[in-house]
Image (cartoon, coloured by chain):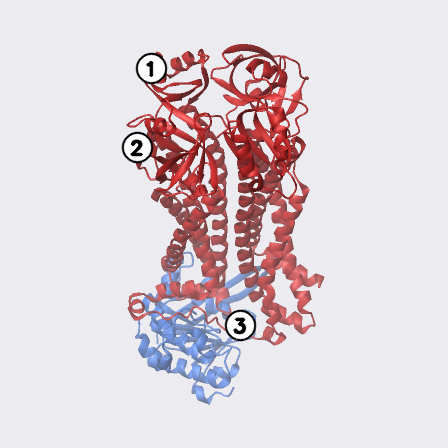
Chain colours: A blue, B red
Amino acid sequence: MEALIRAEKICKDYDAGEVKVQALKHVSFEILRGEFIVILGPSGSGKSTLLNILGGIETVTSGAVYYDGTPLSWGDLKSLTAYRRAHAGFIFQFYNLMPGLTALENVELAAELSKDPLDPETLLGQVGLLDRANHFPSRLSGGQQQRVAIARALCKNPDILLCDEPTGALDSSTGSQILKLLSEFNRQYEKTVLLITHNENIAGIADRVFYFKDGCLERIRVNERPLKPEEVVW
Amino acid sequence: MKSFRKNVVRCARQNPGSFMGAVFIIAIGIFVYVAMMDTLRNLGDQVQRYYDSSAIADVFAQVSGISEVELERLKEIPGIEEVSGKMAVDVRLFAPSQTEIVTVHLLSYDSSDSLNRLMLNGTGTRRDSIYLGNRMAGIYGYENGTPLTLMIDGKSVRFELAGTCYGPEYIYAIPPGGAMIPDGEIYDIACIEKNRMEELTGKKDSMNELGFRLSKGYTYEDVRYQLMDRLTGYGLISLTSKEKQASYNMVKGEINELYSMGTVLPFLFMSISVFMLYVVLKKMIDRDQSLIGTMKSFGMRDRELILAYLYQGVEVGVLGALAGSVLAVPFGRYMFLMYVDFFNLPDTVYHSYMSTRISGMGIAVGTGLLAVYLGVRGILKITPAQAMRAKTPASAGNLRLPGFLASRLGAMEKMGLRSVVRNPFRGFLIILAIAFPFSMSSVLFSFKGVADQMFFDQFSKVQTYDIQISLDRYVSSIRGKLAGEEIRGVEKSEAVIQKAVELKHENLSEFALIYGLNRESSMWRIMDLYGRFYDPPEDGIIINSRIAEKLHLKEGDVMEVSVPGLTAEAVKVPVKAVIKESLGGGCYISAKGFSRFFNSVPLAGTILLKVESGKLKDVREELLKTSRVTWLVDTGRITQSYRDMMGSMMAMIQMFSFMAVAAGGILIYNISMINIRERISELGTFIIMGGTDKEIGRILLFEQVVYFILGIALGVFGSLGVKYLMEHLVISDSYTIELAIRPSCYGIAFLTCLAMAGASLLAQTRFVRRIRLTDILKERE
């Protein structure tokens, strides 16, 4: 399989007052098209920083990231916006739905941003919320909101789904449903999924697991036989 | 407790724009309040002190002449406690450096006067001493000892200036001839010893300006008819209560106007401050919900928590009051001097009153505390358990759009539209912040144009003559006209009648001026507020609506008219029309009609002159030499004095417009920024999804357009309210302005508000550009 993303010795430093924090230290890896990657690591290990860099919302201090063989241009905000618009879909821990839009309108908003969107209603149906299409986020449960967020992320028809603790605010049963959806979409639409979590049990569903510690990619584990989401023990 | 307060203060400092905005708006309110109230107190106290020390009368009368003994007898009327009289006559004054015909209202001075005592400020009274009104003496810079010549009864008499004088009924000394603004250059009071006055006028013991003090418990109405009966035999010209006396009424009107402005305007600004602080504090409490819950779980009481936030209100109030009080000093002084310029007062020292500042501080702190309390009372509802829970997304703003709109609007427009209704109160405040300056400025900008138009119309359509002169005796109309035309440089001349009359209808009576005008005249015509012209009637009277209202008169009614010196009994005259006029307020009849109704030969005391182009100066110089002219009114001069008065008022009005726009701008900016801060997550998410700056701008623009349209719509209604307020606050009794709001002023107000909304949009867009996207990923709604 071809590499969708290639990271070469990326470093990210932050200035925290007088102290310089190295969030990422010479991290290199490749992510293949259609892969399901889980990134594991304790707080402060650099997982979120990596996700932000791959999502084009944060810059690297040194090193390079290639998307489909093309380097991401950190200095050019317009190209980063274009990259996010065309290729990246985000799923947030706290859903981040637009409170003034109904479930369907939230998905339609993503469709308006894309040149080649998927059908919003079909996607809402696939996440099981067609009957809630006209409900506003305030009237949806956390799990339902996250399902809308998944439909929204997919609607743009991105190549890569970046999920930052998507089950972090959900109970185990709802969390399992969300993972199932992500897994299904990963297989059905051949979307690359990058999922950050604290929960090591979730790592079982991934094709590969990246272990981060102190800003370093400590190791990569390949799951020869990934688990089905419903097999995950919470 | 102390630590928590410290935290609250520090958190508030993170939002300096809102904090300073609230301080600024409170400062504007206190500024207006302190400036107006200080001026009011300076003016009110000084006027009252003067009235008290000079024993101003309760009732005023003008007669042809009455002796002291006969005047004393009027004390027999139940309710009349004290009587006093003066001799008064309008005479020409000749003095160095005059370029105008200068007239003084010469009064007799008697130190034993019990009422309306003249206050003299000078070197003592001698036979040839004259005291001149402070205003005129000041304008000409006359020093004591300056020789002044009076033309009394055709005789030239030389006096020496001994000082300045003030009369309580001449604080606002209006020149005759249709002007309504004091003009010390051509008219003021003067006084000489009573004996000398008797000697010069040849009238011994004959007083014509009378004052009466009422016994306790009596009113003007109790003595009015008996006084009228008794004084008619002495040629009663006018009888008024103190409240209706020209100067008293004008001074009182100005003080009332100041009081209204000094209370209504600060109230408006304070209300805006309350709204703004409320929004800021409410947002702060929402943000601090978990902190408050945590503090409650630690055992902190509601009272302690609320007190910590109330401290903010005190701080905003105190800072606003201090800033407002400091700024008010020069403005208050300016306003006071503006009034002093028109009022003849013995004490013109401006005092800054501490009590005004203390009450201003009280109002400001009270406003701050009220706003903060309204904002933070939600604290009482927060439970410790809430500290641990994420806030549920707001359900407000979940507006169902009608099908036709839902299908036409994109998701971005829907986002914008629903954001408008998400927090209706806050949305309403933004709408109000656009409507308030729009209403204020559209009306205030119109005011100048309308006033200019009014004066322009009056002197280009109604009184189109160049000069009006008054003679020291009545002549026949034809003789008067011919005499005018004989003056070199005069193109046309007309003689008109001006007489003080008493009008009666039902049980009501009113003194007014009647004008006997010439039909088909082009120099003095009758025009109403709406530009309609009327011919002076021969078979009745056209009456001003203000007088008609007082006498309960309408068209077709018949009233009784008494003309002192002409009619022994009142004459019945029908009312042909009741008209509203911009300026002036008299009754009009044709010269022929006047002769017919009042059985007199055609007589005239006033000559109107239309001067050939470029000859005005020559004609004035010629008239200056004529001893028979008691006063001269130059329409250019009247217009100029109106413009001067309006200029001062306009400066004040424009400052209020500016303050309204500034307050609106601060409000729009702050509330918009609060709104946008609340939507960081929403807009940040949109950017992460790939939304471009242009698309963000589109969402924000859509919102701003909705607010703007609603704001302008409300502003149009508001302008009608402000117009009503202005008509009742600013418009004087002596003129009526139909305050039509001009489309061009709506246009300027629209552009001003558009600029404010545009600036706010720009600030919001800049703010969105600075959102740290990395924070969005972990942010709770």
Crowding at dot 3, Cα within 10 Å, few <14 / some 14-19 / many 20+, comes out as some
Q: Locate residue B414 relative to residue B303 in the image: left or right.
A: left
Q: Which residue is mark 3?
A: B391
Helix, strand or loop at label 1? It is helix
Q: Amino acid at mark 2?
A: Asp
Which amino acid does the dot numbered 3 rest on? Lys
**Numbered mark located on residue B482 in the image:** 1
Which comes sooner in the sequence, label 2 or label 1?
Answer: 1
B368 relative to A97 in the view: left or right: right
Residue B198, image quadrant = top right
Q: Amino acid at mark 1?
A: Leu
Q: Residue at x 37, y 26 (%)?
A: B599
Q: Quadrant of residue A2?
A: bottom left
Residue that carries the numbered disc 2 in the rendered image: B535
Of all chains, the one bearing label 1 is B
How many numbered circles does the render carry? 3
Number of other residues with Cα within 10 Å of mark 1, as a class: few under 14, some 14 to 19, many 20 or more: some
Q: Measure how far apart labels 2 and 1 are at the Cα level.
A: 23 Å
- Vertical arrangement, residue B387 with respect to residue B773, above or below: below
